[in-house]
Image (cartoon, grey):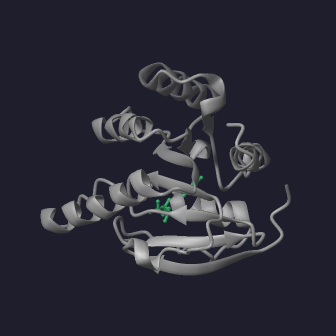
Amino acid sequence: MKIKSSEFIISAVKREQYPDDNLPEIAFVGRSNVGKSSIINSLTNRRGLAKVSQTPGKTRLINFFLLNKDFYLVDLPGYGFAKTAKTNKDKWSGFISKYLSGSDNLGLVCQLIDIRHKPLDSDIESYHWLLDCGLQVQVILTKADKLSKNAAMAQKALFKRELGLDDSRIMTYSVTQNTMRSELIGRIMTALEGHY
Ligand code: GDP
């Protein structure tokens, strides 16, 4: 699949605002600053499409991007907002979980985890929660360029063990190297075809 077109459609906080054309959706979740916007820009080859921010927790809305006029990439607010008040944090996680557990069009959830971190409770709990919702999950270890090849492999093995994943469900990614871009597009395609 070639990404021929990409456009920002809407930032939403509730169901009435989501696109209502029933096109399949691929969602991106993860802690703030993990690289969600960067991976969307990398996939679409458009640097400014999703804002890349240096401040964790800045993206507080559910952003829908239409690709090839055929499916959506959905950028969700990060979980684990260190710098925000608890009440806001609760509200955000409320509408994120509502979207994730309630969307009929969600074909795949890409869960992004910073490759340099050890498995954190919030990542592990989120992963199992997504599975419990009956969702297909692709784990993506981001910023792979920050580690040596060996260290990146070791982290991949650790997460694979910790989350009980088989090889097809976990991959590394680097937006600076773009090495896994076609592989991720392939996985998205498989999910869109319903064979994931
Ligand atoms: P978000 O909050 O999850 O949307 O994260 P961003 O996409 O805004 O990225 C947070 C920071 O990590 C930015 O400074 C990015 O430039 C940086 N970043 C994201 N992906 C990569 C990567 O693959 N390699 C490197 N070296 N930096 C990255």
Q: Nearer the viewer, residue 26 or 113?
A: 26
Q: Do we see residue 23 in this rendering?
A: yes
> Residue at position x 55%, y 72% from top?
64
> Residue at position x 52%, y 24% from top?
160
Q: Do we see residue 52 in this rendering?
A: no
Query: Residue 60, located in which quarter of the rendered image?
Result: bottom left
Marker count (numbered): 0
What percent of the width, then of the height, locates residue 87? Answer: 14, 66
Query: Residue 163, located in which quarter of the rendered image?
Result: top left
> Residue at position x 30%, y 41% from top?
122
Q: Nearer the viewer, residue 22 or 66?
A: 22
What percent of the width, then of the height, locates residue 157? Answer: 54, 21
In this image, 44 relative to 79: left or right?
right
Query: Residue 195, located in which quarter of the rendered image?
Result: top right
> Residue at position x 46%, y 53% from top?
29
In this image, 193 relative to 169: left or right?
right
* In the rendered image, the vertical position of residue 11 relative to residue 102, given as above or below: below
The quarter of the picture where the N terminus appears is: bottom right
The quarter of the picture where the C terminus appears is: top right
What percent of the width, then of the height, locates residue 141? Answer: 54, 40
* In the rendered image, the vertical position of residue 64 relative to residue 161, given as above or below: below
What percent of the width, then of the height, locates residue 94? Answer: 27, 60
Q: Nearer the viewer, residue 147 or 132?
A: 132
